[in-house]
């Protein structure tokens, strides 16, 4: 067998064993392996070898002490070591002289997603720790055309913050209501001869910066600049014809810092104020003004905004304002996820996605609808700590945090995805009773009456090989002889020694229910569920045996529709 494949199986077995107190489940490993590498299913020639290898590795790992399993997985793949997630200690805030006041700065181009929720939670943590005040300031100034403001985002952002239990001040600030304040301080900079109106086009501006050359408009008089500024506000210039720039050193080591643009003209309609304004500040100017006027003491932001912070400081120095303390955090990256608000916006507005809660957005709304718990999100994000370094975390870490919460409450049911009907010759009629939850027998049981016809998943059906022993979970053992399936025995002990795989199943009967599951990639898994599922209430989370956690989203006349949570 390929050494890489063998190593992968070992990692999966170790991870599963550690999760379940040192004992790995062979069938779970098979399902996870084929999910990660579906091409292996087609390799009929080597399937038996793969099964034998999994069985051998499971036996070896299960004979190890739990501590030794953990040490080995830590050595081979520490990112999969999910049994204990130790939250990293967050540093204390510096320079606390007055009451701590911090702010959230969401840009309303869409809802918050799992990736950009972290700084919001960190702000909330510190304000609660120091009994301070947290302001919500919606950063809805018109920016580049690629970052379009969406009307729905205003409420979606607030809804997401409330779901995460982030406590912010009742008064919400909107930058689109504060344009006249920004204009006032722009005029003050002009009067101090620290800002000027520039008529260079984009290409000229870029070339001058690169060559460290002052713009020909830079030395216009204060009086002329004030006149030009009033003309800009009076809509006498078109978009792209004029900007307001701040005077910095043209020798600055960072070209982007050289005479940076503070205001630009945009005639796009705004969701809240429509076309009332056509002159909009860039982020660092509006924040330089607001962080002072709103008495912000500490700013926590991503390290990608360092140049904006430097510009804020530059403006504070001109106006002789006190500097808040600035804390930076690295970016959070989640393995196998490409999070993009601009992509999600495009797909939602084009109707390719079903809405802002489409599972492919990984928005807070989508996670909530899939039955992720807010505490799991918080624990996951806090576990990455506060550091300047970018942090990459496996998606399984998030799933594990959520699994800790929902696994004890999720009853088990059979859902057969893409069902195939089989007939097992000589099968006796059986009355099968299975606990709703293996750890809580007091919750009751599911009861089945079986004959000789069963539904199994097409995935399991394709894996059945002749002359091997298979088991229908908690029911019976069978083998394949030629084109027929033959009853072997009922007892699990007779399967345990040489059996290949345990399958979930349903008896062929008229009371089964049609089920659809919206998966995290937007596809639909369709199949059959046991009749007891008809009694489930909306938003109930269950565990589909050997499928994963799913939440009942709606009941239709002829089917139940679930949303997939995770494995």
Image: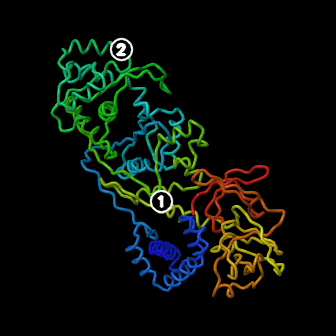
Picture quadrant of residue 456:
bottom right
Which quadrant of the rendered structure holds the C terminus? bottom right
Residue found 49% across the figure and 77% down from its top? 1
In the rendered image, the vertical position of residue 563 relative to residue 10, given as above or below:
above
Q: In the rendered structure, find residue 395 and report the number of the disc placed on it.
A: 1
Q: Nearer the viewer, residue 116 or 165?
A: 116
- Of mark 1 and mark 2, the one earlier in the sequence is 2
Using the numbered discs, state the Cα–Cα distance from disc 1 to disc 2 in whole angstroms: 50 Å
Picture quadrant of residue 292:
top left
Locate residue 75 relative to residue 22 in the image: left or right: left
Total marks shown come to 2
Decide: few, some or many residues near mark 1? Use Cα within 10 Å; few <14, some 14-19, many ≥20.
Answer: some
Locate residue 72 relative to residue 353 in the image: left or right: left
In the rendered image, the vertical position of residue 344 relative to residue 205, given as above or below:
below
Q: Which of 385 and 75 is in front in this view?
A: 75
Q: What element carries label 2?
A: loop
Q: Which of 311 and 346 is in front in this view?
A: 346
Q: Can residue 174 be seen in this view?
A: no
Q: Can residue 431 be seen in this view?
A: yes
> Hey, which residue is sitting farthest front in the picture?
45
Residue 108 image offset from top left, x and y in percent: 46, 36
Picture quadrant of residue 281:
top left
Residue 524 image offset from top left, x and y in percent: 65, 53
Q: Name the residue under label 2.
A: 237
């Amino acid at each position: 067998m390929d050494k890489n494949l063998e190593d992968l199986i070992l990692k999966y077995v170790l991870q599963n064993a550690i999760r379940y107190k040192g004992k790995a489940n062979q069938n779970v490993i098979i399902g996870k392996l084929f999910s990660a590498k579906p091409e292996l299913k087609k390799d009929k020639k080597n399937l038996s070898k793969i099964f034998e290898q999994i069985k051998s590795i499971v036996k070896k790992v299960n004979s190890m002490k739990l501590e030794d399993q953990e040490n080995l997985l830590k050595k081979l793949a520490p990112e999969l070591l999910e049994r204990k997630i130790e939250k990293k200690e967050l540093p204390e805030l510096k320079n606390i002289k007055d009451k701590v006041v911090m702010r959230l700065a969401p840009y309303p181009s869409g809802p918050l997603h799992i990736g950009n929720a972290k700084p919001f939670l960190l702000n909330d943590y510190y304000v609660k720790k120091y009994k301070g005040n947290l302001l919500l300031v919606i950063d809805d100034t018109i920016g580049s055309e690629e970052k379009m403001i969406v009307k729905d985002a205003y409420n979606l952002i607030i809804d997401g913050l409330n779901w995460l239990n982030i406590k912010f001040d009742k008064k919400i600030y909107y930058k689109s209501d504060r344009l006249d304040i920004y204009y006032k301080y722009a005029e003050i900079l002009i009067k101090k001869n620290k800002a000027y109106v520039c008529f260079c086009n984009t290409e000229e501006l870029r070339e001058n910066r690169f060559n460290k050359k002052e713009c020909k408009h830079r030395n216009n008089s204060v009086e002329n600049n004030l006149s030009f500024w009033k003309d800009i506000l009076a809509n006498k210039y078109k978009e792209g014809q004029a900007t307001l720039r701040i005077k910095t050193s043209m020798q600055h080591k960072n070209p982007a810092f050289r005479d940076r643009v503070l205001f630009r003209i945009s005639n796009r309609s705004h969701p809240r104020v429509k076309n009332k304004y056509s002159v909009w500040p860039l982020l660092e100017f509006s924040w330089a003004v607001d962080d002072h006027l709103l008495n912000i003491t500490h700013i926590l932001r991503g390290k990608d905004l360092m140049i904006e912070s430097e510009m804020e400081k530059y403006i504070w120095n001109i106006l002789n304002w006190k500097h808040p303390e600035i804390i930076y955090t690295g970016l959070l990256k989640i393995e196998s996820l490409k999070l993009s608000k601009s992509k999600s916006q495009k797909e939602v507005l084009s109707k390719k996605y079903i809405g802002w809660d489409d599972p492919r957005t990984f928005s807070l709304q989508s996670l909530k609808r899939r039955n992720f718990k807010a505490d799991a999100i918080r624990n996951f994000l806090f576990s990455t700590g506060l550091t300047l370094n970018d942090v990459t975390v496996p998606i399984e870490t998030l799933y594990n945090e959520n699994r800790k919460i929902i696994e004890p409450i999720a009853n088990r049911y059979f859902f057969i995805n893409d069902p195939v009907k089989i007939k097992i010759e000589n099968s006796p009629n059986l009355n099968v009773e299975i606990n709703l939850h293996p750890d809580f027998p007091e919750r009751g049981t599911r009861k089945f009456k079986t004959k000789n016809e069963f539904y199994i998943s097409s995935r399991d059906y394709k894996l059945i090989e002749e002359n091997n022993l298979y088991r229908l979970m908690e029911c019976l053992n069978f083998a394949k002889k030629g084109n027929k399936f033959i009853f072997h025995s009922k007892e699990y002990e007779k399967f345990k020694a040489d059996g290949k795989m345990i399958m979930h199943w349903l008896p062929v009967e008229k009371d089964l229910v049609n089920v659809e599951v919206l998966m995290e990639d937007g596809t639909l898994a369709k199949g059959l569920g046991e009749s007891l599922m008809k009694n489930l209430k909306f938003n109930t989370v269950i565990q589909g045996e050997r499928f994963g956690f799913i939440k009942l989203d709606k009941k239709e006349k002829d089917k139940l529709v679930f949303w997939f949570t995770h494995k």
